[in-house]
Amino acid sequence: MYRVLFFLLLITFNFNLSVIAQEIPEEISLPNTNKNKINGFVDINGYYDTRSFDVLTVNTLVNLPFRLQYFSFINLFGNSGRADQFSLNRYYTEQNVYFSPYLNLPIDINGQWAFATGFTDTIRIGSRWRVQDTPPLKKIFKKLNLIYLPAFFPLQYDRSKGYDALIEHFYRVQLFPKLFGDRLYSSGFIDHNFLFGSDNKKNHNVFVVETQVGFRLVKKLYIVCEYRYNEFYSKKKHGIGIGLEYDFKF
């Protein structure tokens, strides 16, 4: 019941953000030291996956006062190769809260709550490094139009026995800005799961990889193509997603 209420609140929250959306600069990063300023983005993505199912993804990022940041994504998808592949009756979501304790150190404390259809909830505690905000590297990353955010979660609570942990890698880069301006980008992530619980006796290193290229067609509408690899799937680990993305900034 609490998950249903949570989804209703999140959908209402995303709708309200889209209503007040307006243009702001692309660079959005911690820490937000202005107590009266809140900014961020919401983007909605619809894909057809070559493994014969459809995906609807909503990403939300909000920079909050007191050096806090919220980020979440929700994946809704159908069943592969079945008549109900368009029903979007399965989901996976991650809810993240970040806190930047130091103004001059680009390290954030990260709490994460993940849950999905048919799986128990997972709570993770760790830290994130904003590499592009690191003083010796800042100029290089700015010149490359590159954002890189690795995160390490040494503490993970779920119902499996044994020790589990996670390393996440996220990147985003503007491609050929002199030629395309801000129209062409690439972004993606690598999740490296360390699974030593009783439910994972054979494979202790499980990877999930997604990387996409997006091209802005008009205003806030992009066409996107994404490569996907998921070792949690027993079959059809590889797939290509093709679709559209619409984003709101506020």
Image (cartoon, rainbow, N blue to C red):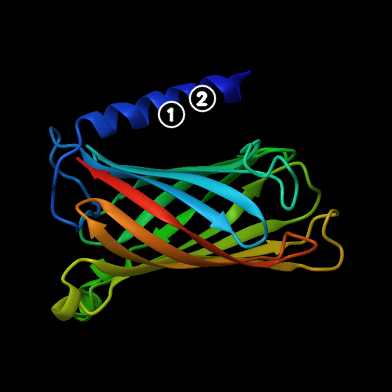
For residue 21, which quarter of the picture? top left
Residue underneath mark 2: 6
Secondary element under disc 1, as helix, strand or loop, is helix
How would you rate the neighbour count of disc 1 (Cα within 10 Å): few for under 14, some for 14-19, many for 20 or more?
some
Residue type at mark 1: give it.
Answer: Leu
Relative placement, left or right, of 241 versus 172 is: right
Q: Which residue is mark 1?
A: 10
Left or right of 67? Residue 203 is: right
Quarter of the image holding residue 68?
Answer: top left
Q: Is residue 67 visible?
A: no
Which residue is pictured at 36% across the width and 60% down the height? 223
Q: Percent from the top left, x then y, of residue 42?
A: 32, 42
Q: Residue at x 86, y 54 (%)?
A: 198
Give percent across and percent down for residue 232. Answer: 72, 59
Q: Which mark is residue 232?
A: none
Quadrant into which the C terminus falls: top left
Task: Please provide percent x and percent y for residue 141.
Answer: 24, 76
* x 12%, y 40%: residue: 34
Question: Would you say the residues marked 2 and 1 are in contact, meaning their CB atoms lie under 8 Å apart?
Answer: yes
Q: Which three-letter amino acid code belongs to the residue tagged 2? A: Phe
Question: Alpha carbon of mark 2 to alpha carbon of mark 1: how far?
Answer: 6 Å
Pick out the residue farthest to the front.
Answer: 83
- 222 left or right, relative to 165: left
Whole-percent x and y of residue 140?
Answer: 21, 81
Task: Give the SS element for disc 2.
Answer: helix
Q: Nearer the viewer, residue 156 or 168?
A: 168
Q: Picture quarter containing residue 13?
A: top left
| Front residue of this view, candidates 25 and 130 | 25
Residue shown at the point (24%, 78%) measured from the top left: 137
Q: Nearer the viewer, residue 15 or 93?
A: 15
Q: Quadrant of the N terminus?
A: top right
* Residue 168 visible within the image: yes
